[in-house]
Amino acid sequence: MSQATGKICVIRLGSLGDLVLMVPMLHALRSRFPSKEIHLVCKEKYAGLFDAGGLIDSFIPVKRGDLRELIRLRAALSRERYETIIDAHGVIRSNLLFHSLRAGKKLQIRKDEFKKAALIVGRINLYRRIESHAERYAALAARLGAETRAAHPGLPVSPAAETRAESVLGGDGGSVNLAFAPGARWPTKRWPPEHFARLISDAAARGYRCILVGGIEDRVANAEVSALSGCSPLDLTGSLSVMESAAVLKRCAALVTNDSAPLHLAESVGTPVIAFFGPTVREFGYYPRLPNSRALEATLACRPCSRNGKRSCPYGTKKCLASIEPRAAIEALIGTLEKSRRPS
C-alpha cells in the first residue's frame, strides 16, 4: 500500500475576504512545515492571491463547484495521498471532499451557525468571547503544532504587483493617498453612495488624494459615488487584479470601506481601515483587527438581521448604515491618520 506524502491540502472554496483571513494560518503552516507541500483548493478567480511569498506550493482551482466537478476533483486529490487535510470552509461542498478523502490527519473549521441564529432570530448572545475568523483559521494550524508567531502576519505582495501599483498611482504631488471601497456583494451592506460622496469630497478638500477601488462588479456603484462627489477621484475600479489591489492599498494611508473583502485585503498589507457595519456584528468574526482601524456602527435593536448581509433590510430603510453620518466618518478617518503618524 502506498504511503502518504508530506503534503497538506487546505480546502477553502471562497470567498476573497476569508482567503485573506487565512494568511496567518498559512504563515504558521509554512513556518512549522517548511519542507512539506501546501496545496490550496479554491475558486479559480482567486488564483493570483498567493503568487508571492511561498505560502502555498500548488493552487488547485474550482470553477463552478457543481457535483460533477467535485467528483473529478475528489479523484484528483485522492491521487495526491495527502498526509493532512484541512477543511477551512465547512460547507456542503467542502464536506463532500473532506469526508470522502483519506489522510492521516483531518481537521475541520469550527462553525458557530447556532450562535449566529440565536443572535439574529432570538436576540440571545451566546458568544462568550469575540473571535475573528483569522483566529479560527490559525487555530486549525495550532492543532498541528503550528503556532502563529506575529500578531498580524501580512500577505506577501509580488514584485509585478508592486510595479503595477507604482504605475497606476504615478506621482502623487506629495499628497497622502486615501482609498475608498463603496461596493459590497450585498446592497444591504453598503453605506449610502451620497454619504461616500460627501466623505470623499471632504477628504479631497483637506488635500488628500482619493482613490476608488473595487472589482468589475462595483463599477456602476463607484461611478455613481465619483459623480456625486464632484471632485474626480482616481477610479481604479475593475482595472486591477487582487494582488495589484493589495499593492495599491499598501500605498494608502487608510481605506474607507463596507464590511467586504477590501477591508481584509487592506489590513493584510498593514493599511488601517474605517469600516461600516450594518446588518452584521463583530461577533461574526469579520471586524477590523489592526490597532488603528475603526468600525462604525449604529446601536439598533434590529441588529444583526443577517449572518452575511444577503437578506434585505426587514424595514426597507437600511437605517443601520444610513444613520452613520459622513461627519462621524471623517472624524474617525482623521483620528486614524493621526494615530498612524505617531511613532509606536
Image: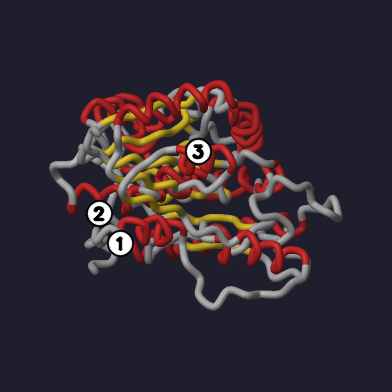
Image quadrant in which the N terminus is located: top left
Q: Between marks 2 and 3, how big is the CA–CA gap?
A: 20 Å
Q: Are marks 2 and 3 in contact (CB under 8 Å)?
A: no
| Mark nearer the N terminus (1 vs 2) | 2
Q: Give the secondary structure at mark 2.
A: helix
10 Å crowding of disc 3: few (<14), some (14-19), many (20+): some
For the point 23% across and 67% down, the residue is 343
Separation of residues labelled 1 and 2 (CA atoms)? 8 Å
Q: CA distance from mark 1 to mark 3?
A: 22 Å
Question: 278 left or right of 208?
Answer: right
Dot 1 corresponds to which residue? 142
Q: Position of residue 81 (x, y in %)?
A: 29, 34
Disc 3 marks which amino acid?
Gly
Q: Do the CB atoms of the residues marked 1 and 2 lie less than 8 Å apart?
A: yes
Instruction: Specify the label residue 14 is tagged with.
Output: 3
Residue 61 visible in the snapshot: yes
Q: Earlier in the sequence, mark 1 or mark 3?
A: 3
Q: Quadrant of residue 340?
A: bottom left
| Type of amino acid under label 1 | Ala
Q: Position of residue 258 (x, y in %)?
A: 57, 49
Amino acid carrying mark 2 in the image: Ala
Q: Can residue 207 be seen?
A: no
Could you tell me which residue is drawn at 66 percent across and 46 percent down?
A: 190
Mark number, residue 165: none
Task: Kindly state the secondary structure of the residue where label 1 is placed.
Answer: helix
Residue sticking out furthest to the left: 35
Residue 286: % across, % down:
51, 57
Q: Quadrant of residue 49?
A: top left
First of labels 2, 3 by sequence position: 3
Q: Which residue is mark 2?
A: 28
**Location of the C terminus (image quadrant):** bottom left
